[in-house]
Image (cartoon, rainbow, N blue to C red):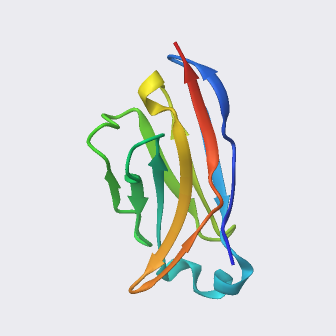
Amino acid sequence: VQLQASGGGLVQAGGSLRLSCVAPRTIFSEFITYVMAWYRQAPGKQRELVASITRDGIRNYGDFVKDRFTISRDNSRKTVRLQMTGLKPDDTAVYYCNAERGTTAFWGQGTLVTVSS
């Protein structure tokens, strides 16, 4: 059971991308109870939190985001999005969607974001 992520690609530095992720049908009825998040993992580095959002819209961002990214969720469509602007080469990574509630977590397959200089 995986979340379906999309929207990655190749972009020049300073550009923008929007990532989207749809929850698996198995959690549709309880989607609102999950904290939704985006993580990323660059080659040779550990996976790190990019942004998260609670059912009430409380957002948390990694320090490196610095007002460049915005996470949002649409509870009616069971989706979470990550709008990324001002992309830098250091943002190059595989981005993973995550749904978490207590000890239960679902992950997406990852979508590659490549930022060229």
The image shows residue 76, relative to residue 37, as above or below, that is below
Q: On the image, which quarter does residue 30 sit in?
A: bottom right
Q: Residue furthest left?
A: 63
Side of 87 where 29 appears, left or right: right
**Between residues 109 and 6, which one lies in front from this camera angle?**
109
Side of 102 where 30 appears, left or right: right
The residue drawn where x is 34% and y is 35% is 67
User: Which image quarter is the N terminus in?
Assistant: bottom right
**Between residues 80 and 50, which one lies in front from this camera angle?**
50
The residue drawn where x is 62% and y is 54% is 110
The residue drawn where x is 47% and y is 23% is 89
The residue drawn where x is 40% and y is 70% is 56
Q: Position of residue 10 (x, y in %)?
A: 66, 26
Q: Position of residue 53 (x, y in %)?
A: 42, 62
Q: Position of residue 96 (x, y in %)?
A: 55, 55
The image shows residue 71, relative to residue 4, as above or below, that is above
Can the viewer see residue 91?
Answer: yes
